[in-house]
Image (cartoon, rainbow, N blue to C red):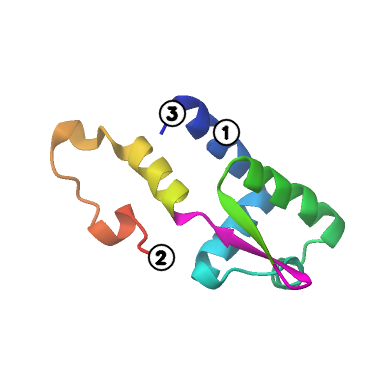
Amino acid sequence: MEENDVVRSLAALAQPIRLRVFRALVMAGPSGLTPGALTETLGVPATGLSFHLKELVHASLISQERQGRNLIYRASFDRMNALLGYLTENCCEGEACAVDGKAAACDC
């Protein structure tokens, strides 16, 4: 992962609502959520939610797919794992980390 991509991803997550949206999509897994489900779950107005979703899509942290009349948003697990990998690449001075494998990556 390039440094500019890391900065873009971290900047997108450095806002409370976007962080909550991203975490909700991670919890939803590969099935994703519609904007309506996100507004209901998070209590975020639909008008503001669309702006935050656009920012997360721009950072490639989430994807958008049209299914009929609905938009489905999903967390980009590959991008999330690449970001985590970049951040922890040189941790523990090259020694095995105390973090277990489950916390280091998501296999969704």
Instruction: Answer yes or no: is residue 25 visible.
Output: yes
| Looking at the image, residue 66 lies above or below residue 99 | below
Q: Is residue 93 left or right of residue 25?
A: left
**CA distance for labels 2 and 1:** 23 Å
Quadrant containing the N terminus is top left
Residue located beneath label 1 in the image:
8
Name the secondary structure under disc 2. loop
Asked whether residue 50 is drawn in magenta, I would say: no
Q: Earlier in the sequence, mark 2 or mark 1?
A: 1
Q: Which one is in front, 60 or 105?
A: 60
| Looking at the image, residue 4 lies above or below residue 71 | above
Instruction: Answer yes or no: is residue 15 visible.
Output: no
Label number found at residue 103: none
Q: Earlier in the sequence, mark 3 or mark 1?
A: 3
Quadrant containing the C terminus is bottom left
Residue located beneath label 2 in the image:
108
| Looking at the image, residue 55 lies above or below residue 39 | above
- Kind of residue at badge 3: Glu
Q: Residue at x 57, y 44 (%)?
A: 60
Q: Residue at x 59, y 44 (%)?
A: 13
- Residue 52 position, x and y percent, is 73, 49
Name the secondary structure under disc 3. loop
- Kind of residue at badge 2: Cys
- Residue 66 position, x and y percent, is 70, 64
Q: Is residue 11 left or right of residue 44?
A: left
Q: Which one is in front, 39 or 82?
A: 82
Q: Is residue 83 left or right of residue 58?
A: left
Residue located beneath label 3 in the image:
2
